[in-house]
Image: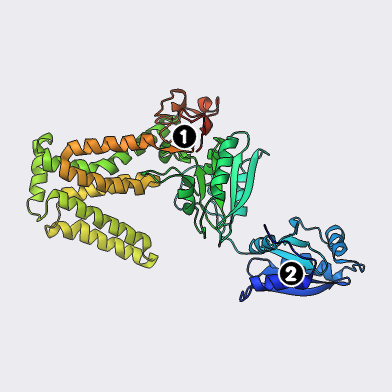
């Protein structure tokens, strides 16, 4: 049970001073209200000091408060002196600490077991800008920032309805990170909303510094993501309107979306702004790129090592001549080029911006030119690696899964040939079809199949047809009715 405040200013301050011992940013401003001693508490850096002075301290110190008890003084302040927009009563020490950490100023009065909290947040936040990881040609150019309050506002600006709900909770026994659960009451399944709340309450994290920390607590680990992420408010609102749950983590610029279907990895907000035929072409291109990024190196190794008769004679001659002067087999070359490319990608991603161009130049010279000139690798292997790398970036949401699967299929193709590739592809397909997120198969509506839900899967129909009937996620085929979302 939370420990309540006591009607003694000394007792309350002894408790709080002990909690905030050696905290240099803890502000304690003592003053007098009428005949009662009082103190204003805040955390330096989280409040606007000018706002505190103008809106709280000046009115309190200039008002003539009649002599009365502590409880009566608190009531007098609430009713006659201060009228802040974000003003509330606090009755426990835990709530005092939570509000202080959230940028509130708290006033304690001697003789009262209640405190008054004022929302005077004044910390700096990053300005709204277009997300770097989800650049779109059409639509809005604003993105989520690290403040959950601002992110909530970005969603509310697009969802002008009282059905748009935001539920607060706290995750992390040490960080006590504020989390918001956003959903559309008219579209979301109440059972799903309650299940997500329970999963967050059961979360055993000590610290929550990134929204991705929540993934294992919202869905069991698998090959592909069963939890979605986005930095775009318009994309989040689109998922909310479909009955999804969006989780906003304070301090994170990306939000969590549950449940996530596999087909959504190939969908972008631009698909719904472009013409249907072009959007469908783009979507099919992304699916083809995914298959190329996963299977092409493995098939190349398998055919070169076990089934050369499947290649045209001219192409076979080219591959044989390019690999004749190299010391390694095509299987070893493919593995080496895979790891070299991933090393270069990671170096370009992690290196300081001042060195990123140098990393790119070195990578191009060493891998692209010197490796071939020195006879360590063949031109064909490097071309296959380049095509695979480009195809992998077409679908960035599942780049990590595609990279791991690519390595697996290279190993299978180099040891078992095309029969091994076929068997591995079937195992991957069975695995994907067996994955369930909150009682919904991630391959729905393809498996289980629903013709009515195929309007926005491989092809996208026009908005005239899409707007005729809503398709909430809980209506997808294969949803477990009994004990769903378990």
User: Quick check: can you spot residue 39?
Assistant: yes
**Most extreme residue toward the right, as rendered?**
66
Quadrant in which residue 302 is drawn: top left
Considering depth in this image, is 53 or 243 the residue closer to the camera?
A: 243
Residue 54: horizontal and vertical position, in percent? Answer: 77, 67
The residue lying furthest to the front in this view is 1
Q: Residue 317 appears at what percent x and percent y?
A: 8, 42
Q: Position of residue 240 (x, y in %)?
A: 56, 39
- Extreme top residue here? 451
- In the foreground, 486 or 62: 486
Between 52 and 187, which is closer to the camera in this rendering? 187
Q: Secondary structure at mark 1?
A: strand
The residue under label 1 is: 440
Q: Nearer the viewer, mark 1 or mark 2?
A: 2
Residue 23's mark? none
CA gap, disc 1 and disc 2? 50 Å
Tell me whether circle 1 and circle 2 mark residues in contact (CB < 8 Å): no
- The mark found on residue 12 in the picture is 2
Residue 333 rendering spot, x and y as whole percentages: 16, 52
Q: Earlier in the sequence, mark 1 or mark 2?
A: 2
Colour scheme shown:
rainbow
Q: From the viewer's perspective, is 348 left or right of 305? A: right
Crowding around mark 1 (Cα neighbors within 10 Å: few <14, some 14 to 19, many 20+) is many
Q: Residue at x 32, y 57 (%)?
A: 345
Q: Is residue 24 above or below residue 106?
A: below
**Residue placed most toward the observer, 85 or 440:** 440
Image vertical order of residue 145 relative to residue 21, above or below: above
Count neighbours of disc 2 (C-alpha within 10 A) and say few if under 14, some if 14 to 19, many if 20 or more: some
Q: Residue at x 49, y 51 (%)?
A: 214
């Amino acid at each position: 049970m939370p420990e309540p405040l006591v009607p003694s200013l000394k007792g309350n301050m002894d408790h709080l001073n002990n909690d905030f011992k050696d905290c240099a940013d803890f502000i304690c401003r003592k003053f007098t209200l009428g005949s009662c001693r009082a103190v204003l508490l805040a955390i330096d850096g989280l409040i606007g000091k000018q706002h505190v002075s103008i809106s709280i301290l000046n009115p309190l110190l200039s008002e003539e408060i009649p002599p009365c008890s502590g409880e009566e003084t608190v009531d007098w302040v609430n009713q006659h002196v201060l009228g802040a927009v974000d003003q509330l009563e606090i009755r426990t020490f835990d709530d005092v600490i939570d509000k202080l950490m959230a940028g509130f100023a708290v006033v304690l009065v001697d003789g009262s077991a209640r405190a008054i909290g004022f929302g005077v947040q004044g910390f700096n936040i990053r300005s709204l800008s277009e997300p770097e990881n989800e650049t779109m040609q059409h639509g809005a150019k604003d993105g989520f920032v690290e403040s959950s309050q601002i992110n909530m506002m970005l969603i509310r600006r697009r969802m002008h309805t009282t059905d748009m709900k935001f539920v607060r909770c706290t995750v992390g026994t040490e960080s006590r990170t504020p989390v918001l659960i956003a959903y559309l009451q008219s579209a979301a399944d109440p059972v799903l909303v309650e299940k997500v709340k329970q999963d967050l309450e059961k979360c055993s994290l000590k610290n929550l510094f990134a929204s991705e920390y929540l993934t294992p607590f919202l869905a069991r680990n698998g090959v592909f993501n069963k939890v979605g992420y986005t930095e775009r408010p318009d994309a989040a609102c689109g998922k909310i309107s479909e009955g999804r749950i969006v989780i906003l983590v304070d301090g994170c610029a990306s939000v969590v979306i549950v449940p996530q279907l596999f087909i959504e990895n190939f969908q972008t907000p631009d698909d719904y702004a472009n013409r249907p035929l072009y959007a469908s072409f783009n979507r099919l291109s992304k699916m083809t790129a995914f298959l190329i990024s996963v299977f092409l190196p493995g098939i190349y190794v398998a055919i070169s090592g076990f089934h050369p008769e499947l290649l045209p004679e001219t192409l076979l001659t080219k591959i044989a001549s390019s690999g004749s002067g190299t010391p390694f087999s095509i299987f070893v070359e493919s593995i080496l080029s895979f790891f070299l490319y991933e090393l270069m990608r990671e170096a370009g991603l992690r290196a300081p911006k001042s060195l990123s161009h140098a990393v790119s130049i070195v990578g191009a010279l060493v891998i692209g030119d010197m490796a071939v000139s020195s006879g360590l690798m063949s031109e064909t292997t490097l071309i296959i690696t380049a095509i695979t790398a480009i195809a992998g970036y077409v679908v960035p949401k599942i780049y990590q899964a595609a990279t791991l699967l690519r390595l697996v299929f290279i190993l299978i193709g180099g040891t078992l040939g095309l029969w091994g590739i076929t068997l591995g592809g079937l195992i991957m397909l069975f695995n994907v079809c067996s994955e369930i997120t909150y009682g919904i198969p991630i391959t729905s509506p393809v498996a289980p199949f629903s013709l009515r839900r195929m309007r926005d899967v491989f092809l996208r129909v026009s908005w005239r047809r899409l707007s005729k009937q809503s398709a909430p996620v809980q209506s997808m085929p294969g949803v477990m009715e009994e004990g769903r979302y378990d």
